[in-house]
Image (cartoon, rainbow, N blue to C red):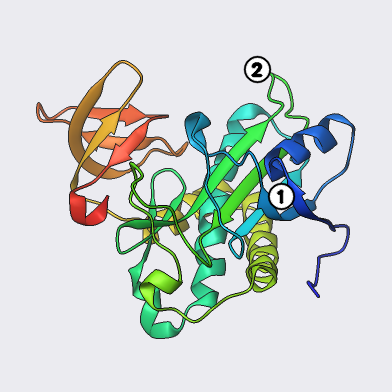
Amino acid sequence: MVDLPSGAALRRFIEIDSTNEEARRLGESGAEGPLWIVAERQTAGRGRRGRSWVSPPGNFMGTLLLRPRCGPRQAGELSFVAAVAVFDAVETLLPPPDRPGLRLKWPNDLLYDGRKLAGILLESSGIAGAEVAWLAIGIGINLAGHPEGVEFPATSLPAIGAPPVAPDEALAALVAAFERWLAIWRGVQGFAAIREAWLARAIGLGEGLTVRLAQETFDGVFEGLAPDGALLLRLADGSLRQVSAGDVFFAPAAA
């Protein structure tokens, strides 16, 4: 039994196309959040930039549907709220000796020893200059297994030797972590506190990385986050470049 905050709801599915797709359907039909949608199997799970998300039974597959009542810029901050919340939730599921391997890769991938342990996908109804009507935070955590031969190397709890974790245990940890970090985001410190928490959990600060955009690939040194969450990259000519969207690659040991 998962203990939900007051006003929150939970919908469970044995099989569904995608929990994010269900969140979209519910959001557009007027469903109120916060609403957690979880599934045992997905037939059309997806990740960032339209990539498929392969997830065997036993992994966590779920989406949090929110009505954030803010504009698109502020809604984008929830990508970092989600990253910190997922980090903290997974950290509580690991034995203390295993926790130092956890790190966040910009903007919101959860890595363990440089390999992807969890992914996050935000989708919304966003209309420029207007309030976002609904926002879906899709989360996949490799509790039981992970794909091989993918562009971004992956891992799972069994692969790192961690004790088994049931999807409902992960859901309970996520519910608690999101409740805490959403309250902080809505509080006095707002995104500044989220940005600080994200940086404290980040991989690769001060290290070289490669950014791949649709029409350009370039290298630089990861110097931090801009106040709005954009990645700050120091280029070879000494200039500082802000990156708002793109794929990031570190050295092979921390891909």
Q: Residues within 10 Å of mark 2 (few under 14, many from 20)?
A: few
x then y, percent, for residue 226: 39, 38
Depth check: give the residue in front, 17 or 77: 17
Q: Which residue is mark 1?
A: 64
Residue occupying image coordinates x 70% and y 64%: 175
What x and y, as percent, mark residue 109? 44, 50
Compare marks 2 and 1 and give the one earlier in the sequence: 1
Residue farthest along the left direction in this orientation: 237
The circle drawn on residue 127 is none
Disc on res. 128 = 2
In this picture, residue 146 sits left or right of residue 82: left
Residue 128, image x and y in percent?
65, 17
Q: Nearer the viewer, residue 13 or 183?
A: 13
Is 246 placed left or right of 94 in the picture?
left
Q: Position of 99 compared to 212: left or right? A: right
Secondary structure found at label 2 = loop
Question: What amino acid is found at the position of numbered circle 2 in the picture?
Answer: Ala
- The quarter of the picture where residue 28 lies is top right
Amino acid found under the numbered disc labelled 1: Leu
Pinpoint residue 207: horizontal percent, then vertical percent: 18, 49
Is residue 210 visible in this depiction of the protein? yes
Identified at 80% across, 51% down, the residue is 34
3D distance between C-alphas at marks 2 and 1 = 22 Å
Residue in front for this viewpoint, 93 or 226: 93
Q: Which quadrant is home to the N terminus?
A: bottom right
Q: Residues within 10 Å of mark 1 (few under 14, many from 20)?
A: many
- Tell me: 194 left or right of 12: left
Q: Secondary structure at mark 1?
A: strand
Residue 107: image quadrant is: top left
